[in-house]
Amino acid sequence: MNSQTSNRWLIVLGTIIVQMGLGSIYTWSLFNQPLVDHFGWQLNSVAITFSITSFALAFSTLFAGKLQDRWGIRRLIVTAGIVLGAGLIISSQVSALWMLYIMAGVVVGFADGSAYITSLSNLIKWFPEKKGLISGISVGAYGTGSLLFKYINGALIQNVGVSHTFLYWGIIVMILVIGGSFLVREAQVTSQSQSVKGVQANDYTVKEMLKTKEAYLLFIMFFTACMSGLYLIGIVKDIGVSLADLDVTTAANAVALVAIFNTIGRIILGALSDRVGRLKVVAGALLMTAIAVSVLSFVKLNYGLFFACVAGIAFCFGGNITIFPAIVADFFGLKNQSKNYGIVYQGFGIGALSGSFIAAALGGFASTFTFIAVLSIISVIIALFIKAPGQRAVLKKEKRNEKTQAA
């Protein structure tokens, strides 16, 4: 193993450490009831905090690329780690909901998203030949962080109380993110490092990307993939009780199942996309999602069927959110990856909010799953026919040449 290869894997290690710290925010559900018990707030009002966090996370990705250009990747991650940790530490002192919304919602979400998208995109640039696998490792580390901190934060809440948990959580996350950043180095993109099926990929700016129809088609696909997974994560225990007639304790096991299969899907489907093609894997994952949500809608559920559907949706969701950063790099180049993926990533933020609103409008779980199934089939069709802009231009040129020769 040469020194360059060795250095690349040190950057992988640093990114994994950073992403594990960032992924800890997905333990928020642990805090809802303890905060209600401690302050006497309404449960729904406390739960809104994580919706604010998710939206701020997605919104921050629109600006993270510009901050990286100005500060460099390491300085950006260090700053995000300090702000993220400080937001959690200050949350330990809040006494009003609006303070919680600002610190644990806006501040934490913005810092988390800024470091998430830039560290992910930077790592993909270091491994242009293994975009899917590397994206899977990075996004998988984010998911592993949420699993690890379920135990850390759960133990802290029990032993020191919910307010003090914010303090210790903030300190641990700050150490992880800042510590991991010292192993991260800025990637340099070379022109020979990127091609899709032998066609040289152009480095699109955000403005150039937004002039292509492919940007909007990818957004539709990503929104569909995110909404299906995020909606399930939010209500998986409830659908186990209401649709599968499970007791509360048994249905609660589905929460752990979602986290496990979500992480497995990120690694397996990310690596598979390098071998068989990203759009084929996305199409397959969306088709599996459509089948699973259709079963949840129309079939009488038992224990096994319920858990199989939940595992399938979580697996596909994890895989899809892993593959899309690589697809954006394939379609629009590596140079502006953070900025371009930041645009498409808004599908995550909108998807996080849309599921609940659609469920309220349609009147229940089953009708919402039917709606998701329809969107998933539409996205499967898009995935089967969409081409990278450069590849589409080459195909058009070849057809023109064929017509000219025939004439």
Image: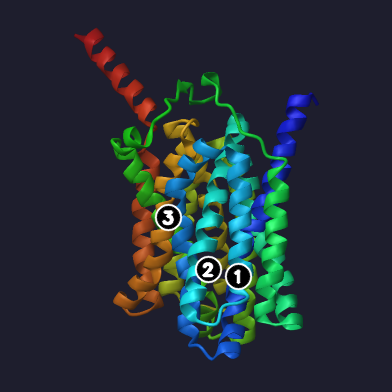
Q: Are the residues tagged 2 and 3 within 8 Å (C-beta)?
A: no
- In the image, 61 versus 363, the foreground residue is 61
Q: Are the residues tagged 1 and 2 within 8 Å (C-beta)?
A: yes
Mark 2 or mark 3, which has the lower sequence index?
3
Q: Residue at 69% across / 48% down in the picture?
A: 16
Density class for disc 3 (Cα within 10 Å; few <14, some 14-19, many ≥20) is: many
Residue 268 seen by the camera: no
- C-alpha distance separating marks 3 and 1: 22 Å
Which image quarter holds the N terminus?
top right
**In this figure, which residue is indicated by the disc labeled 1?**
90
How many discs appear?
3
- In the image, 320 versus 77, the foreground residue is 77
- In the image, 340 versus 60, the foreground residue is 60
Quarter-of-image position of residue 185 = top right
Could you say whether the residue bearing mark 1 is in a helix, strand or loop? helix
- C-alpha distance separating marks 2 and 3: 16 Å
Identify residue type, mark 3.
Phe
**In this figure, which residue is indicated by the disc labeled 3?**
59
- Furthest-left residue in view? 407
Q: Is residue 119 above or below residue 49?
A: above
Residue 23 at x, y = what percent?
Answer: 62, 59
Residue 248 at x, y = what percent?
Answer: 59, 86
Which image quarter holds the C terminus?
top left
Could you say whether the residue bearing mark 3 is in a helix, strand or loop? helix
**In this figure, which residue is indicated by the disc labeled 2?**
103
Density class for disc 2 (Cα within 10 Å; few <14, some 14-19, many ≥20) is: many
Q: Is residue 176 left or right of residue 53?
A: right
